[in-house]
């Protein structure tokens, strides 16, 4: 059996479809995915992608087929170029290999004796399903934790019969949205978003930007001496590209440091133990690759 771009495979109750799709701005790129089948085509909502990092470039020869070993294989160029293959021949399901979505009834493995935890990974952009910068989310609402006989612990959430369509989405911006389908307006509406405050979204203001939470509406600003990397995007509310220096750094040429209180330190930094505040300043000043430092006292009981 083979599935080609002109055909889809629909689930028993018609809720989901498996097939080939192309994002609106992905010229010449095609993917195999699963989407909600019983909502309007113009609102197609993809909840799983097989070949997210290996797009099809020759749609005329693409096919998803069952191989000789009973595994699923996605290929193009009449089977000569293999783009994706299910990692087991005996049993495989998309729920075991999530993309950016968590659906009702979907078990998200948190621990197992031999198998790694499930990882939900965001898209790279609104029309780019390749692996993005954010991963590792799990549902927080209607959460159930279960442990199986094989030592597997997983989380899931359920819905009563007749409930609206809902799902969790790990968005490319770093937020997690819990979405409900509104049939009257034909759109997904958020039930909740996490984090609730923009300033708590990881990397929201980009490099050399900071989120000012003192305003009524949290606003991204550039550090002194920096300006938006893209003025148009910044004005439009997209701060992800951050800020850039207005003047090049003169390493060893008299540049100093600016004190910035109440800032969150980056997650990746070099720790220097048993140093004074002045030692930290001297260490950073001596390295042209060091752009900032923070000092904290660590007292052991």
Image (tube, helix red, strand yellow):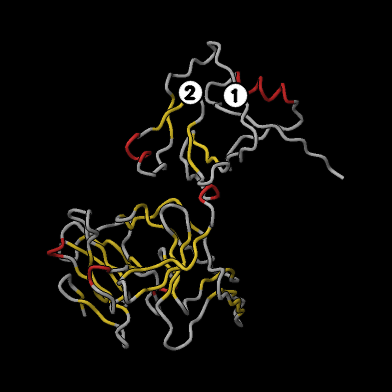
Q: Which mark is residue 209?
A: none
What residue would you read off at disc 2? 225
Q: Depth check: give the residue in front, 120 or 4.
A: 120
Across and down, in percent, residue 255 comes to: 55, 15
Q: Residues within 10 Å of mark 1 (few under 14, many from 20)?
A: few
- The answer to whether marks 1 and 2 mark residues whose Cβ atoms lie closer than 8 Å is yes
Left or right of 143 in this view: 234 = left
Question: What SS does tag 1 mark?
Answer: loop
The residue most toward the left is 60
Left or right of 282 in this view: 82 = left
Q: Residue at x 44, y 88 (%)?
A: 161
The residue most toward the top is 253
Q: Residue at x 18, y 72 (%)?
A: 4
Q: How many marks?
A: 2
Q: Depth check: give the residue in front, 150 or 117.
A: 117
Q: Depth check: give the residue in front, 28 or 230.
A: 230
Quadrant containing the C terminus in the rendered view: top right
Quadrant containing the N terminus in the rendered view: bottom left
Q: Is residue 198 above or below residue 103?
A: above
Across and down, in percent, residue 39 comes to: 28, 76
The quarter of the displayed image where residue 32 is located: bottom left
What residue would you read off at disc 1? 258
Q: Residues within 10 Å of mark 2 (few under 14, many from 20)?
A: few
Question: Could you give the CA–CA distance between mark 1 and mark 2, rounded to whole angstroms?
Answer: 10 Å
Across and down, in percent, residue 168 comes to: 45, 68
Q: Residue at x 49, y 15 (%)?
A: 250
Question: What SS does tag 2 mark?
Answer: loop
Q: Residue at x 60, y 19 (%)?
A: 285
Across and down, in percent, residue 114 comes to: 57, 69
């Amino acid at each position: 059996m083979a599935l080609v771009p002109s055909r889809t495979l629909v689930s028993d109750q018609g809720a989901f479809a498996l097939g080939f799709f192309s994002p609106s701005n992905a010229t010449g790129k095609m993917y195999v995915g699963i989407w909600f089948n019983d909502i309007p085509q113009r609102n197609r909502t993809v909840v799983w992608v097989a070949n997210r990092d290996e797009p099809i470039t020759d749609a005329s020869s693409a096919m998803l087929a069952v191989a000789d070993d009973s595994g699923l294989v996605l290929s193009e160029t009449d089977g000569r170029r293999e783009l994706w293959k299910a990692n087991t021949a005996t049993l495989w399901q998309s729920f075991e290999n999530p993309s950016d979505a968590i659906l009702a009834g979907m078990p998200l493995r948190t621990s197992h004796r031999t198998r790694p935890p499930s990882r939900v990974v965001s898209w790279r952009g609104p029309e780019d399903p390749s692996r993005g910068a954010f991963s590792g989310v799990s549902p927080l609402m209607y959460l159930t934790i279960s442990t199986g006989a094989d030592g597997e612990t997983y989380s899931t959430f359920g819905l009563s019969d007749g409930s609206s369509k809902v799902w969790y989405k790990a968005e490319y911006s770093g937020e997690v949205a819990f979405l409900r389908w509104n049939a009257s307006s034909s759109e997904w509406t958020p039930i909740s978003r996490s984090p609730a405050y923009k300033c708590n979204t990881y990397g929201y203001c980009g490099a050399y930007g900071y989120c000012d939470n003192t305003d009524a509406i949290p606003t991204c600003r550039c550090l002194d001496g920096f300006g938006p990397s893209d003025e148009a995007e910044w004005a439009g509310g997209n701060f992800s590209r951050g800020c850039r220096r207005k003047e090049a750094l003169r390493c060893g040429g008299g540049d100093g440091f600016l004190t910035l209180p109440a800032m969150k330190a980056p997650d990746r930094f070099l720790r220097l133990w048993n140093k004074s505040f002045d030692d930290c300043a001297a260490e950073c000043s001596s390295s042209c690759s060091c752009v900032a430092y923070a000092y904290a006292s660590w007292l052991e009981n």
